[in-house]
Image: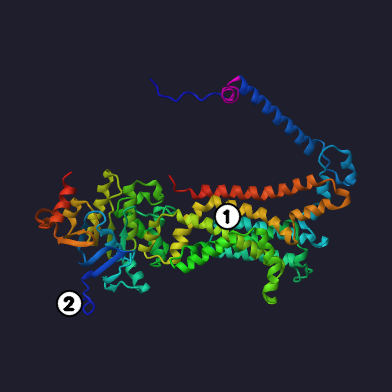
Amino acid sequence: MTDLAPPAPGMLEDLRRRFFASPLQALVSLLSLGLIALVGWKLLNWALLSAVFDASQGAEACHRAAGACWSVIAARWRIILFGLYPYEEQWRSALACVAVVAMTVLSCIPAFWTGRRIAAIWLAGTTVFYVLMKGGVLGLSHVGEESWGGLALTLFIFVATCLIGFPLSIVLALLRRSELPWISRTTGLIIDAVRSLPLISILFTFAIVLPFALPHWLQGDKLYRVIVGSALFFAAYQAEIVRGGMQGVAHGQGEAAMALGLSYWQRVSRILLPQAMRNALPATINQFVISFKETSLVVIVGFFEIIASGNAAYGTGEWRFAYAEVYTFIAFIYFVFVFSLSRYGAFLERRMSVGER
Amino acid sequence: MATLAQSPNPDIALRIEGMNKYFGNFHALRNIELTVTRGEKIVVCGPSGSGKSTMIRCINRLEEHNSGRIVVLGTELNDDVGNIDEIRREVGMVFQHFNLFPHMSVLENCVLAPMLVRKLPRPQAEEMALRFLEKVRIPEQASKYPGQLSGGQQQRVAIARALCMQPQMMLFDEPTSALDPEMISEVLDVMVTLAADGMTMICVTHEMGFARRVADRVIFMDRGEIIEEAPPETFFTASRNERTRQFLSQILNH
Protein backbone atom coordinates (compact mmCIF):
# COMPACT_ATOMS: atom_id res chain seq x y z
CA MET A 1 0.00 0.00 0.00
CA THR A 2 2.58 2.50 1.10
CA ASP A 3 5.38 3.35 -1.29
CA LEU A 4 8.16 4.08 1.19
CA ALA A 5 11.69 3.25 0.10
CA PRO A 6 13.00 0.04 1.72
CA PRO A 7 14.82 0.85 4.97
CA ALA A 8 18.54 1.46 4.59
CA PRO A 9 20.62 -1.47 5.89
CA GLY A 10 22.27 -0.96 9.27
CA MET A 11 26.00 -0.42 9.46
CA LEU A 12 26.82 -4.02 10.40
CA GLU A 13 24.58 -5.36 7.66
CA ASP A 14 26.15 -2.94 5.22
CA LEU A 15 29.66 -4.10 6.19
CA ARG A 16 28.65 -7.72 5.84
CA ARG A 17 27.23 -7.16 2.36
CA ARG A 18 30.21 -5.19 1.16
CA PHE A 19 33.14 -7.14 2.64
CA PHE A 20 31.95 -10.55 3.81
CA ALA A 21 29.49 -11.68 1.17
CA SER A 22 31.36 -14.94 0.41
CA PRO A 23 34.01 -16.96 2.31
CA LEU A 24 36.72 -15.95 -0.17
CA GLN A 25 35.75 -12.30 0.10
CA ALA A 26 35.79 -12.58 3.88
CA LEU A 27 39.27 -14.06 3.77
CA VAL A 28 40.60 -11.26 1.51
CA SER A 29 38.95 -8.66 3.73
CA LEU A 30 40.51 -10.11 6.88
CA LEU A 31 43.95 -10.40 5.28
CA SER A 32 43.80 -6.79 4.06
CA LEU A 33 42.65 -5.61 7.46
CA GLY A 34 45.56 -7.43 9.08
CA LEU A 35 48.03 -5.90 6.64
CA ILE A 36 46.66 -2.39 7.22
CA ALA A 37 46.82 -2.86 10.96
CA LEU A 38 50.39 -4.13 10.78
CA VAL A 39 51.64 -1.26 8.61
CA GLY A 40 49.69 1.25 10.68
CA TRP A 41 51.20 -0.06 13.91
CA LYS A 42 54.75 0.00 12.50
CA LEU A 43 54.29 3.55 11.31
CA LEU A 44 52.79 4.71 14.58
CA ASN A 45 55.56 3.01 16.51
CA TRP A 46 58.25 4.59 14.33
CA ALA A 47 56.77 8.06 14.16
CA LEU A 48 55.54 8.50 17.73
CA LEU A 49 55.87 5.69 20.27
CA SER A 50 59.58 4.90 19.93
CA ALA A 51 60.60 8.25 18.51
CA VAL A 52 63.05 10.68 20.06
CA PHE A 53 61.79 14.22 20.45
CA ASP A 54 64.27 15.62 22.91
CA ALA A 55 67.05 17.46 21.14
CA SER A 56 69.12 18.08 24.28
CA GLN A 57 70.97 14.76 24.06
CA GLY A 58 71.92 15.27 20.44
CA ALA A 59 72.24 12.56 17.85
CA GLU A 60 73.47 10.00 20.39
CA ALA A 61 70.00 9.41 21.86
CA CYS A 62 68.69 8.56 18.40
CA HIS A 63 71.22 5.78 17.87
CA ARG A 64 69.87 4.02 20.94
CA ALA A 65 66.19 4.43 19.97
CA ALA A 66 64.24 2.25 17.52
CA GLY A 67 61.93 4.98 16.23
CA ALA A 68 62.15 8.22 14.36
CA CYS A 69 64.73 10.81 15.33
CA TRP A 70 62.67 14.00 15.39
CA SER A 71 65.39 15.75 17.31
CA VAL A 72 67.10 16.32 13.97
CA ILE A 73 64.25 18.65 13.10
CA ALA A 74 64.48 20.40 16.47
CA ALA A 75 68.19 20.86 15.94
CA ARG A 76 68.27 21.71 12.25
CA TRP A 77 64.92 23.26 11.36
CA ARG A 78 66.42 26.65 10.78
CA ILE A 79 68.58 25.30 7.97
CA ILE A 80 65.60 23.57 6.41
CA LEU A 81 63.41 26.64 6.51
CA PHE A 82 65.96 29.36 5.84
CA GLY A 83 68.88 27.69 4.04
CA LEU A 84 72.06 29.72 3.92
CA TYR A 85 70.40 32.91 5.11
CA PRO A 86 72.59 34.54 7.83
CA TYR A 87 71.66 33.02 11.19
CA GLU A 88 71.06 36.27 13.09
CA GLU A 89 68.86 37.62 10.29
CA GLN A 90 66.63 34.57 9.87
CA TRP A 91 63.72 36.29 11.59
CA ARG A 92 63.53 38.42 8.45
CA SER A 93 63.21 35.34 6.29
CA ALA A 94 60.47 34.03 8.60
CA LEU A 95 58.56 37.30 8.41
CA ALA A 96 58.99 37.31 4.64
CA CYS A 97 57.38 33.84 4.49
CA VAL A 98 54.51 35.13 6.57
CA ALA A 99 54.14 38.08 4.20
CA VAL A 100 53.98 35.83 1.13
CA VAL A 101 51.51 33.45 2.77
CA ALA A 102 49.36 36.38 3.95
CA MET A 103 49.42 37.86 0.48
CA THR A 104 48.35 34.55 -1.05
CA VAL A 105 45.60 33.96 1.49
CA LEU A 106 44.25 37.49 1.13
CA SER A 107 44.17 37.32 -2.64
CA CYS A 108 42.23 34.06 -2.38
CA ILE A 109 39.37 35.77 -0.53
CA PRO A 110 36.58 36.83 -2.92
CA ALA A 111 36.06 40.15 -1.08
CA PHE A 112 39.46 41.29 -2.40
CA TRP A 113 38.77 40.45 -6.04
CA THR A 114 38.75 43.93 -7.47
CA GLY A 115 41.60 45.11 -9.63
CA ARG A 116 42.70 47.79 -7.19
CA ARG A 117 42.62 45.61 -4.06
CA ILE A 118 44.45 42.70 -5.68
CA ALA A 119 47.08 45.06 -7.06
CA ALA A 120 47.51 46.67 -3.63
CA ILE A 121 47.85 43.29 -1.90
CA TRP A 122 50.38 42.00 -4.40
CA LEU A 123 52.39 45.18 -4.43
CA ALA A 124 52.48 45.32 -0.62
CA GLY A 125 53.24 41.61 -0.28
CA THR A 126 56.11 41.52 -2.76
CA THR A 127 57.59 44.79 -1.47
CA VAL A 128 57.55 43.58 2.13
CA PHE A 129 59.08 40.27 1.06
CA TYR A 130 61.77 41.91 -1.02
CA VAL A 131 62.75 44.54 1.57
CA LEU A 132 62.86 41.97 4.37
CA MET A 133 64.86 39.45 2.39
CA LYS A 134 67.27 41.73 0.60
CA GLY A 135 67.66 44.47 3.22
CA GLY A 136 70.07 47.32 2.59
CA VAL A 137 67.41 49.81 3.71
CA LEU A 138 65.69 50.70 7.01
CA GLY A 139 68.76 49.57 8.96
CA LEU A 140 68.49 45.99 7.66
CA SER A 141 71.79 44.54 6.58
CA HIS A 142 72.16 43.57 2.91
CA VAL A 143 71.63 39.89 2.05
CA GLY A 144 72.21 38.96 -1.59
CA GLU A 145 69.87 36.61 -3.49
CA GLU A 146 72.59 33.95 -3.55
CA SER A 147 72.13 33.53 0.21
CA TRP A 148 68.37 33.15 0.10
CA GLY A 149 67.14 29.65 0.69
CA GLY A 150 64.81 27.13 2.21
CA LEU A 151 61.06 27.62 2.47
CA ALA A 152 61.28 31.37 1.85
CA LEU A 153 62.97 30.77 -1.50
CA THR A 154 60.53 28.01 -2.50
CA LEU A 155 57.55 30.23 -1.68
CA PHE A 156 59.05 33.23 -3.42
CA ILE A 157 59.78 31.32 -6.63
CA PHE A 158 56.32 29.76 -6.63
CA VAL A 159 54.40 32.95 -5.94
CA ALA A 160 56.45 35.02 -8.37
CA THR A 161 56.03 32.34 -11.05
CA CYS A 162 52.26 32.45 -10.61
CA LEU A 163 52.00 36.23 -10.38
CA ILE A 164 53.86 36.63 -13.66
CA GLY A 165 52.74 33.42 -15.34
CA PHE A 166 49.00 33.58 -14.70
CA PRO A 167 48.27 36.98 -16.31
CA LEU A 168 50.67 36.04 -19.10
CA SER A 169 48.74 32.82 -19.69
CA ILE A 170 45.48 34.75 -20.14
CA VAL A 171 47.15 37.12 -22.58
CA LEU A 172 48.58 34.17 -24.53
CA ALA A 173 45.21 32.40 -24.59
CA LEU A 174 43.48 35.53 -25.89
CA LEU A 175 46.16 36.10 -28.53
CA ARG A 176 45.86 32.50 -29.65
CA ARG A 177 42.15 33.10 -30.24
CA SER A 178 42.84 36.24 -32.25
CA GLU A 179 41.04 36.55 -35.57
CA LEU A 180 44.26 37.71 -37.21
CA PRO A 181 45.95 34.50 -38.36
CA TRP A 182 49.52 35.77 -38.01
CA ILE A 183 48.92 36.64 -34.36
CA SER A 184 47.15 33.41 -33.44
CA ARG A 185 49.70 31.27 -35.31
CA THR A 186 52.71 33.03 -33.82
CA THR A 187 51.27 32.68 -30.33
CA GLY A 188 50.48 29.04 -30.95
CA LEU A 189 54.04 28.48 -32.10
CA ILE A 190 55.48 30.10 -28.97
CA ILE A 191 53.20 28.11 -26.67
CA ASP A 192 53.93 24.82 -28.38
CA ALA A 193 57.66 25.52 -28.49
CA VAL A 194 57.83 26.23 -24.76
CA ARG A 195 55.70 23.21 -24.00
CA SER A 196 57.94 20.90 -25.98
CA LEU A 197 60.97 21.78 -23.86
CA PRO A 198 61.69 20.21 -20.48
CA LEU A 199 61.51 22.68 -17.60
CA ILE A 200 65.08 21.87 -16.64
CA SER A 201 66.42 22.94 -20.02
CA ILE A 202 64.47 26.21 -19.75
CA LEU A 203 65.85 26.86 -16.28
CA PHE A 204 69.38 26.11 -17.52
CA THR A 205 68.95 28.43 -20.46
CA PHE A 206 67.66 31.31 -18.40
CA ALA A 207 70.14 30.84 -15.57
CA ILE A 208 73.32 30.07 -17.45
CA VAL A 209 73.02 30.65 -21.20
CA LEU A 210 71.06 33.90 -21.21
CA PRO A 211 73.80 36.02 -19.57
CA PHE A 212 75.98 35.43 -22.65
CA ALA A 213 73.23 36.67 -24.94
CA LEU A 214 71.81 39.62 -23.00
CA PRO A 215 73.44 42.99 -22.39
CA HIS A 216 74.54 43.37 -18.80
CA TRP A 217 71.84 45.84 -17.75
CA LEU A 218 69.13 43.42 -18.87
CA GLN A 219 70.42 40.37 -17.05
CA GLY A 220 69.28 40.92 -13.51
CA ASP A 221 70.15 38.40 -10.83
CA LYS A 222 70.10 34.72 -11.72
CA LEU A 223 67.12 34.28 -9.39
CA TYR A 224 64.94 36.62 -11.42
CA ARG A 225 66.00 35.07 -14.71
CA VAL A 226 65.03 31.66 -13.36
CA ILE A 227 61.68 33.03 -12.21
CA VAL A 228 61.02 34.49 -15.66
CA GLY A 229 61.85 31.15 -17.27
CA SER A 230 59.64 29.24 -14.88
CA ALA A 231 56.80 31.76 -15.36
CA LEU A 232 57.07 31.35 -19.13
CA PHE A 233 56.82 27.58 -18.75
CA PHE A 234 53.84 27.94 -16.41
CA ALA A 235 52.14 30.39 -18.78
CA ALA A 236 52.50 28.10 -21.79
CA TYR A 237 50.71 25.26 -20.03
CA GLN A 238 48.16 27.45 -18.30
CA ALA A 239 47.37 29.25 -21.58
CA GLU A 240 46.18 25.98 -23.08
CA ILE A 241 44.07 25.32 -19.98
CA VAL A 242 42.50 28.77 -20.23
CA ARG A 243 41.92 28.30 -23.96
CA GLY A 244 40.18 25.01 -23.26
CA GLY A 245 37.97 26.81 -20.76
CA MET A 246 37.16 29.46 -23.35
CA GLN A 247 36.15 26.82 -25.88
CA GLY A 248 33.57 25.61 -23.38
CA VAL A 249 31.83 29.00 -23.37
CA ALA A 250 28.88 29.01 -25.77
CA HIS A 251 29.37 31.10 -28.90
CA GLY A 252 26.11 32.91 -28.20
CA GLN A 253 27.53 34.46 -25.03
CA GLY A 254 29.90 36.71 -26.93
CA GLU A 255 27.19 37.55 -29.48
CA ALA A 256 24.71 38.52 -26.78
CA ALA A 257 27.33 40.75 -25.17
CA MET A 258 28.16 42.28 -28.55
CA ALA A 259 24.50 42.93 -29.27
CA LEU A 260 24.26 44.75 -25.94
CA GLY A 261 27.07 47.04 -27.04
CA LEU A 262 29.82 45.77 -24.72
CA SER A 263 33.37 46.50 -25.86
CA TYR A 264 35.97 43.79 -26.47
CA TRP A 265 37.55 44.16 -23.03
CA GLN A 266 34.17 44.27 -21.32
CA ARG A 267 33.17 41.09 -23.12
CA VAL A 268 36.43 39.39 -22.20
CA SER A 269 36.50 40.46 -18.55
CA ARG A 270 32.79 40.19 -17.69
CA ILE A 271 31.49 37.40 -19.91
CA LEU A 272 34.22 35.26 -21.42
CA LEU A 273 36.85 34.93 -18.66
CA PRO A 274 34.53 34.33 -15.67
CA GLN A 275 32.89 31.45 -17.51
CA ALA A 276 36.14 30.16 -19.00
CA MET A 277 37.88 30.18 -15.63
CA ARG A 278 35.02 28.27 -14.08
CA ASN A 279 35.40 25.60 -16.76
CA ALA A 280 39.17 25.60 -16.35
CA LEU A 281 39.27 25.62 -12.56
CA PRO A 282 40.10 21.96 -11.81
CA ALA A 283 42.91 21.90 -14.37
CA THR A 284 44.14 25.28 -13.14
CA ILE A 285 44.44 24.13 -9.54
CA ASN A 286 46.27 21.10 -10.86
CA GLN A 287 48.71 23.34 -12.69
CA PHE A 288 49.35 25.39 -9.54
CA VAL A 289 50.02 22.22 -7.56
CA ILE A 290 52.45 20.93 -10.18
CA SER A 291 54.22 24.28 -10.31
CA PHE A 292 54.61 24.37 -6.55
CA LYS A 293 56.32 21.02 -6.57
CA GLU A 294 58.39 21.84 -9.65
CA THR A 295 60.07 24.70 -7.77
CA SER A 296 62.35 21.98 -6.38
CA LEU A 297 64.01 21.81 -9.82
CA VAL A 298 65.82 25.10 -9.26
CA VAL A 299 68.32 23.14 -7.20
CA ILE A 300 69.77 22.17 -10.61
CA VAL A 301 70.92 25.74 -11.24
CA GLY A 302 72.33 26.14 -7.76
CA PHE A 303 69.56 27.41 -5.51
CA PHE A 304 69.02 26.22 -1.96
CA GLU A 305 65.29 25.79 -2.02
CA ILE A 306 63.69 23.67 0.68
CA ILE A 307 64.80 20.21 -0.52
CA ALA A 308 68.38 21.32 -1.04
CA SER A 309 68.40 22.91 2.41
CA GLY A 310 66.98 19.66 3.76
CA ASN A 311 69.91 17.78 2.24
CA ALA A 312 72.22 20.22 3.98
CA ALA A 313 70.36 19.75 7.28
CA TYR A 314 71.20 16.05 7.54
CA GLY A 315 74.37 16.28 5.51
CA THR A 316 76.71 17.00 8.40
CA GLY A 317 78.38 14.04 10.08
CA GLU A 318 76.33 14.05 13.26
CA TRP A 319 72.88 13.69 11.62
CA ARG A 320 73.87 11.76 8.51
CA PHE A 321 71.55 8.86 9.39
CA ALA A 322 68.41 11.00 9.85
CA TYR A 323 67.46 11.63 6.21
CA ALA A 324 64.08 9.88 6.46
CA GLU A 325 62.95 12.23 9.23
CA VAL A 326 64.11 15.31 7.34
CA TYR A 327 62.35 14.23 4.15
CA THR A 328 59.20 13.39 6.11
CA PHE A 329 59.28 16.88 7.58
CA ILE A 330 59.72 18.46 4.13
CA ALA A 331 56.97 16.25 2.72
CA PHE A 332 54.74 17.48 5.52
CA ILE A 333 55.45 21.12 4.60
CA TYR A 334 54.69 20.41 0.94
CA PHE A 335 51.53 18.61 2.00
CA VAL A 336 50.30 21.56 4.07
CA PHE A 337 50.66 23.94 1.15
CA VAL A 338 49.42 21.69 -1.63
CA PHE A 339 46.52 20.32 0.39
CA SER A 340 45.39 23.85 1.28
CA LEU A 341 45.56 24.70 -2.40
CA SER A 342 43.38 21.73 -3.33
CA ARG A 343 40.86 22.54 -0.61
CA TYR A 344 40.75 26.12 -1.83
CA GLY A 345 40.07 24.80 -5.33
CA ALA A 346 37.16 22.76 -3.99
CA PHE A 347 35.82 25.84 -2.21
CA LEU A 348 36.00 27.85 -5.45
CA GLU A 349 34.20 25.12 -7.38
CA ARG A 350 31.37 25.13 -4.85
CA ARG A 351 31.21 28.89 -4.93
CA MET A 352 31.19 29.05 -8.73
CA SER A 353 28.54 26.39 -9.11
CA VAL A 354 26.00 28.88 -7.76
CA GLY A 355 23.19 29.15 -10.28
CA GLU A 356 23.69 25.74 -11.76
CA ARG A 357 20.72 23.52 -11.56
CA MET B 1 15.61 57.56 -57.25
CA ALA B 2 15.86 58.98 -53.77
CA THR B 3 19.03 57.86 -52.08
CA LEU B 4 19.09 58.08 -48.36
CA ALA B 5 22.43 59.83 -48.00
CA GLN B 6 21.08 63.19 -49.09
CA SER B 7 17.80 62.93 -47.24
CA PRO B 8 18.16 61.39 -43.79
CA ASN B 9 14.51 60.85 -43.07
CA PRO B 10 13.98 60.69 -39.31
CA ASP B 11 10.95 58.45 -39.79
CA ILE B 12 13.04 55.70 -41.32
CA ALA B 13 14.46 53.22 -38.80
CA LEU B 14 16.26 50.94 -41.20
CA ARG B 15 17.21 51.02 -44.84
CA ILE B 16 19.02 48.18 -46.58
CA GLU B 17 20.10 48.76 -50.18
CA GLY B 18 21.51 46.11 -52.52
CA MET B 19 23.03 44.13 -49.65
CA ASN B 20 24.93 40.92 -50.41
CA LYS B 21 26.50 38.46 -48.03
CA TYR B 22 28.75 35.49 -48.76
CA PHE B 23 29.96 32.67 -46.54
CA GLY B 24 33.03 31.63 -48.51
CA ASN B 25 31.60 30.82 -51.94
CA PHE B 26 28.06 30.48 -50.67
CA HIS B 27 25.90 33.43 -51.65
CA ALA B 28 23.84 33.74 -48.46
CA LEU B 29 22.01 37.00 -49.13
CA ARG B 30 21.24 38.34 -52.61
CA ASN B 31 20.46 41.99 -53.32
CA ILE B 32 18.44 42.62 -50.18
CA GLU B 33 16.31 45.77 -50.34
CA LEU B 34 14.34 46.66 -47.23
CA THR B 35 13.02 49.83 -45.65
CA VAL B 36 11.46 49.88 -42.21
CA THR B 37 9.82 52.99 -40.81
CA ARG B 38 9.77 53.79 -37.12
CA GLY B 39 7.16 51.89 -35.18
CA GLU B 40 6.71 49.31 -37.92
CA LYS B 41 6.55 45.59 -37.06
CA ILE B 42 8.04 43.27 -39.63
CA VAL B 43 7.80 39.49 -39.53
CA VAL B 44 10.38 37.61 -41.58
CA CYS B 45 9.67 34.00 -42.49
CA GLY B 46 10.90 31.41 -44.93
CA PRO B 47 12.36 27.92 -45.09
CA SER B 48 15.41 27.06 -43.04
CA GLY B 49 18.63 28.20 -44.68
CA SER B 50 16.87 30.98 -46.54
CA GLY B 51 18.99 33.69 -44.91
CA LYS B 52 16.43 35.20 -42.49
CA SER B 53 18.68 35.03 -39.44
CA THR B 54 21.73 36.12 -41.41
CA MET B 55 19.83 39.17 -42.62
CA ILE B 56 18.83 40.42 -39.19
CA ARG B 57 22.27 39.56 -37.80
CA CYS B 58 23.73 41.89 -40.41
CA ILE B 59 21.67 44.76 -38.98
CA ASN B 60 23.77 44.92 -35.77
CA ARG B 61 26.97 43.57 -37.31
CA LEU B 62 26.93 40.11 -35.77
CA GLU B 63 27.58 39.26 -39.41
CA GLU B 64 29.44 41.55 -41.78
CA HIS B 65 27.78 42.26 -45.13
CA ASN B 66 30.01 42.14 -48.19
CA SER B 67 28.37 44.77 -50.38
CA GLY B 68 25.49 47.21 -50.43
CA ARG B 69 24.50 49.64 -47.70
CA ILE B 70 22.81 49.33 -44.35
CA VAL B 71 21.68 52.47 -42.53
CA VAL B 72 20.29 51.92 -39.05
CA LEU B 73 18.57 54.80 -37.24
CA GLY B 74 20.42 57.30 -39.43
CA THR B 75 23.83 55.73 -38.85
CA GLU B 76 25.60 53.98 -41.71
CA LEU B 77 26.87 50.52 -40.81
CA ASN B 78 30.46 50.39 -42.06
CA ASP B 79 33.88 49.59 -40.67
CA ASP B 80 33.73 52.62 -38.38
CA VAL B 81 33.77 51.05 -34.92
CA GLY B 82 32.09 54.11 -33.45
CA ASN B 83 29.14 53.61 -35.78
CA ILE B 84 28.89 49.92 -34.91
CA ASP B 85 28.92 50.74 -31.19
CA GLU B 86 26.27 53.39 -31.67
CA ILE B 87 24.00 51.04 -33.60
CA ARG B 88 24.43 48.24 -31.06
CA ARG B 89 23.50 50.63 -28.25
CA GLU B 90 20.25 51.52 -30.00
CA VAL B 91 19.25 48.10 -31.37
CA GLY B 92 18.24 45.32 -28.99
CA MET B 93 18.41 41.68 -29.92
CA VAL B 94 16.73 38.52 -28.65
CA PHE B 95 18.20 35.16 -29.60
CA GLN B 96 16.77 31.72 -30.22
CA HIS B 97 18.80 30.24 -27.36
CA PHE B 98 18.31 33.20 -24.98
CA ASN B 99 22.07 33.62 -24.40
CA LEU B 100 21.62 34.85 -20.86
CA PHE B 101 24.87 35.09 -18.90
CA PRO B 102 24.72 31.99 -16.69
CA HIS B 103 27.19 33.27 -14.09
CA MET B 104 25.08 36.30 -13.24
CA SER B 105 21.71 36.65 -11.56
CA VAL B 106 18.75 37.84 -13.58
CA LEU B 107 19.17 41.33 -12.15
CA GLU B 108 22.90 41.39 -12.95
CA ASN B 109 22.11 40.28 -16.51
CA CYS B 110 19.80 43.27 -16.83
CA VAL B 111 21.98 45.98 -15.26
CA LEU B 112 25.29 44.94 -16.85
CA ALA B 113 25.03 46.74 -20.19
CA PRO B 114 23.25 49.87 -18.91
CA MET B 115 26.00 50.29 -16.31
CA LEU B 116 28.96 49.48 -18.58
CA VAL B 117 27.76 50.95 -21.85
CA ARG B 118 25.32 53.69 -20.82
CA LYS B 119 27.32 54.47 -17.64
CA LEU B 120 24.16 54.45 -15.56
CA PRO B 121 24.70 54.42 -11.77
CA ARG B 122 23.71 51.11 -10.18
CA PRO B 123 20.57 52.34 -8.33
CA GLN B 124 19.03 53.75 -11.51
CA ALA B 125 20.03 50.67 -13.51
CA GLU B 126 18.45 48.35 -10.95
CA GLU B 127 15.31 50.42 -10.76
CA MET B 128 14.97 50.28 -14.53
CA ALA B 129 15.75 46.55 -14.61
CA LEU B 130 12.97 45.86 -12.10
CA ARG B 131 10.58 47.98 -14.15
CA PHE B 132 11.28 45.94 -17.28
CA LEU B 133 11.20 42.64 -15.38
CA GLU B 134 7.77 43.73 -14.22
CA LYS B 135 6.84 44.42 -17.82
CA VAL B 136 7.81 40.87 -18.84
CA ARG B 137 5.97 39.65 -15.71
CA ILE B 138 8.77 38.07 -13.71
CA PRO B 139 9.94 40.68 -11.16
CA GLU B 140 10.00 37.97 -8.47
CA GLN B 141 12.83 36.08 -10.25
CA ALA B 142 15.32 38.96 -10.13
CA SER B 143 17.73 37.31 -7.71
CA LYS B 144 17.67 33.88 -9.35
CA TYR B 145 20.20 32.58 -11.85
CA PRO B 146 19.22 31.80 -15.45
CA GLY B 147 19.77 28.07 -14.91
CA GLN B 148 17.02 28.07 -12.31
CA LEU B 149 14.37 29.39 -14.73
CA SER B 150 12.22 27.69 -17.37
CA GLY B 151 12.88 28.38 -21.05
CA GLY B 152 9.95 30.77 -21.33
CA GLN B 153 11.09 32.69 -18.26
CA GLN B 154 14.64 32.88 -19.59
CA GLN B 155 13.46 34.27 -22.90
CA ARG B 156 11.38 36.91 -21.11
CA VAL B 157 14.45 37.87 -19.06
CA ALA B 158 16.36 38.13 -22.34
CA ILE B 159 13.73 40.52 -23.65
CA ALA B 160 13.91 42.58 -20.45
CA ARG B 161 17.70 42.61 -20.67
CA ALA B 162 17.55 44.01 -24.20
CA LEU B 163 14.91 46.58 -23.20
CA CYS B 164 17.09 47.85 -20.33
CA MET B 165 19.34 49.46 -22.94
CA GLN B 166 16.22 51.41 -24.01
CA PRO B 167 16.70 50.52 -27.66
CA GLN B 168 14.84 52.21 -30.49
CA MET B 169 14.52 48.99 -32.43
CA MET B 170 14.34 45.30 -31.47
CA LEU B 171 15.50 42.30 -33.47
CA PHE B 172 14.05 38.87 -32.65
CA ASP B 173 15.86 35.84 -34.05
CA GLU B 174 13.41 32.93 -33.78
CA PRO B 175 12.61 33.77 -30.15
CA THR B 176 10.22 30.86 -29.62
CA SER B 177 11.79 28.05 -31.69
CA ALA B 178 13.76 26.61 -28.76
CA LEU B 179 10.82 26.66 -26.35
CA ASP B 180 8.53 23.88 -25.21
CA PRO B 181 5.08 24.43 -26.76
CA GLU B 182 3.38 25.43 -23.50
CA MET B 183 5.86 28.28 -23.03
CA ILE B 184 5.53 29.89 -26.42
CA SER B 185 2.50 32.00 -25.64
CA GLU B 186 3.97 33.66 -22.55
CA VAL B 187 6.83 34.97 -24.72
CA LEU B 188 4.56 35.97 -27.60
CA ASP B 189 2.29 37.83 -25.18
CA VAL B 190 5.23 39.94 -24.04
CA MET B 191 6.14 40.64 -27.65
CA VAL B 192 2.56 41.67 -28.43
CA THR B 193 2.63 44.12 -25.51
CA LEU B 194 5.91 45.50 -26.76
CA ALA B 195 4.43 45.96 -30.24
CA ALA B 196 1.43 47.75 -28.77
CA ASP B 197 3.84 50.20 -27.09
CA GLY B 198 5.05 51.22 -30.53
CA MET B 199 8.46 49.52 -30.61
CA THR B 200 10.04 49.08 -34.04
CA MET B 201 10.38 45.30 -34.37
CA ILE B 202 11.87 42.88 -36.85
CA CYS B 203 11.00 39.29 -35.95
CA VAL B 204 12.24 36.15 -37.62
CA THR B 205 9.56 33.66 -36.60
CA HIS B 206 7.28 30.91 -37.83
CA GLU B 207 4.50 31.91 -35.44
CA MET B 208 1.95 32.82 -38.06
CA GLY B 209 -0.70 33.68 -35.48
CA PHE B 210 1.67 36.29 -34.08
CA ALA B 211 2.32 37.59 -37.60
CA ARG B 212 -1.42 37.97 -38.22
CA ARG B 213 -1.98 39.83 -34.96
CA VAL B 214 1.00 42.11 -34.91
CA ALA B 215 2.82 42.45 -38.22
CA ASP B 216 2.44 45.45 -40.48
CA ARG B 217 4.27 43.54 -43.19
CA VAL B 218 5.34 39.95 -43.65
CA ILE B 219 8.53 39.29 -45.59
CA PHE B 220 9.08 35.92 -47.20
CA MET B 221 12.64 34.84 -47.95
CA ASP B 222 13.97 31.90 -49.90
CA ARG B 223 17.53 31.05 -50.97
CA GLY B 224 18.91 34.36 -49.76
CA GLU B 225 16.37 36.53 -51.54
CA ILE B 226 13.34 38.49 -50.44
CA ILE B 227 10.63 36.85 -52.53
CA GLU B 228 7.58 38.64 -51.28
CA GLU B 229 6.64 41.51 -49.04
CA ALA B 230 2.99 42.05 -48.12
CA PRO B 231 0.59 42.95 -45.32
CA PRO B 232 -0.39 39.80 -43.42
CA GLU B 233 -3.93 39.45 -44.74
CA THR B 234 -2.73 39.58 -48.36
CA PHE B 235 0.26 37.38 -47.56
CA PHE B 236 -1.72 34.58 -45.97
CA THR B 237 -4.76 34.55 -48.23
CA ALA B 238 -3.89 36.04 -51.59
CA SER B 239 -0.24 35.38 -52.29
CA ARG B 240 0.38 34.92 -55.98
CA ASN B 241 3.88 33.58 -55.50
CA GLU B 242 4.26 29.85 -55.98
CA ARG B 243 7.07 29.40 -53.44
CA THR B 244 5.19 31.40 -50.81
CA ARG B 245 2.07 29.32 -51.26
CA GLN B 246 4.07 26.12 -51.04
CA PHE B 247 5.81 27.28 -47.83
CA LEU B 248 2.53 28.37 -46.25
CA SER B 249 0.87 25.07 -47.05
CA GLN B 250 3.79 23.25 -45.43
CA ILE B 251 3.71 25.15 -42.15
CA LEU B 252 -0.04 25.72 -41.85
CA ASN B 253 -1.45 22.32 -42.88
CA HIS B 254 -0.14 19.85 -40.40
Instruction: Write down the region rendered in magenta.
Output: A11-22
In this rendering, is residue B74 above or below A329?
A: below
Residue that extends furthest to the bottom in the rendered view of this protein: B6
Q: Position of residue A156 (x, y in %)?
A: 68, 60
Q: Nearer the viewer, mark 2 or mark 1?
A: 2
Q: Indicate the amino acid at tag 2.
A: Ala
> What secondary structure characterizes most of the magenta part?
helix
Around disc 1, counting alpha carbons within 10 Å, would you say few (fewer than 14), some (14 to 19), or many (20 or more)?
few
Looking at the image, which residue is at 90% across and 44% down? A60
Subunit of label 2: B
**Which numbered marker is on residue A109?**
1
**Which numbered marker is on residue B2?**
2
Looking at the image, which residue is at 30% across and 68% down? B65
Can residue B105 be seen in this snapshot? yes
Whether A16 is among the magenta residues is yes
Q: Nearer the viewer, residue A344 or A233?
A: A233
Q: Indicate the amino acid at tag 1.
A: Ile
Quadrant containing the N terminus of chain A is top left
Q: Position of residue A150 (x, y in %)?
A: 75, 57
Around disc 2, counting alpha carbons within 10 Å, would you say few (fewer than 14), some (14 to 19), or many (20 or more)?
few
Looking at the image, which residue is at 16% across and 62% down? B229
